[in-house]
Amino acid sequence: MHKDIERIILTEAQIADKVTSLAKEIEKDYRHTVPVLLCILNGAFIFASDLMRALGIDVEIDFMQAASYGDKTFSKGSITILKDATIDLKGRDVLIVEDIADTCITLKGLVPKLEDYGLNSLKLCVLLNKTGVREEKDDVKIDYKGFDIPNEFVVGYGLDYDNLYRNLPYIGILKRRVYTNE
Ligand code: IMP
Ligand code: MG
């Protein structure tokens, strides 16, 4: 285990099993179409690549990157698009692939922008859902959910702190001293 990790909450095997079962569900629902997986950079790139390889249907992938700004305590959904999709999404079945649903400010800002593209359908796949963070009014509908996790800062499997730890194959809670400099 990495020296900065307090404890592992999801092992490599647990994640792999979940990716397989999510892929089974997605495959079934999208068997009559060729969906576009829309991977939200940077955090979701590892999850999206594993998920894509677990899918036994034809599928395309594209990438978007967004930054949320303003006061995090207001979920106004104000975001800036840093990188837009390059595939023409009009009329497509789009599945957003996101690493984690925390405040959901990013996702809530992204959805109306995507709807403007005139998609055929839009669904959301999230590996981790932080519980006890959002009020009911701020919730988003997660169509495919990996795991509910407690409201703690996690890293690994694409998730970072200060751009580090994305390469850990498991998901773990970061030691407090790493981000408090104690
Ligand atoms: P939001 O608060 O739901 O808008 O989350 C925005 C982004 O913050 C996520 O896509 C993650 O990249 C990042 N994030 C949120 N919680 C964590 C965490 O516990 N560890 C690492 N990154 C996180
Ligand atoms: Mg992210």
Image: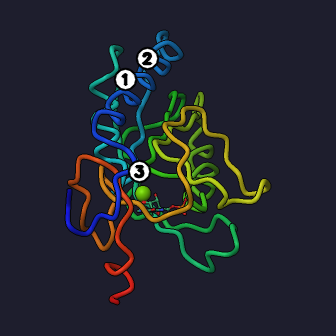
Q: Nearer the viewer, mark 2 or mark 3?
A: 2
| Marks 2 & 1, CB-CB < 8 Å contact | yes
Question: Label 2 sits on what residue type?
Answer: Lys
Cα–Cα span, label 2 and label 3: 21 Å
At mark 1, the secondary structure is helix
The answer to which of 67 and 101 lies nearer the viewer is 101
Task: Identify the residue shown where x is 69% and y is 67%.
Answer: 75
Q: Is residue 109 left or right of residue 8?
A: right
Name the residue beneath numbered marker 1: 20
Q: Residues within 10 Å of mark 2 (few under 14, many from 20)?
A: some
- Residue most extreme to the right: 137
Residue 49, picture quadrant? top left
C-alpha gap between disc 2 and disc 1: 6 Å
| Dot label at residue 40 | 3
Task: From this view, report whether residue 20 is shown above or below residue 79.
Answer: above
Residue occupied by mark 2: 24
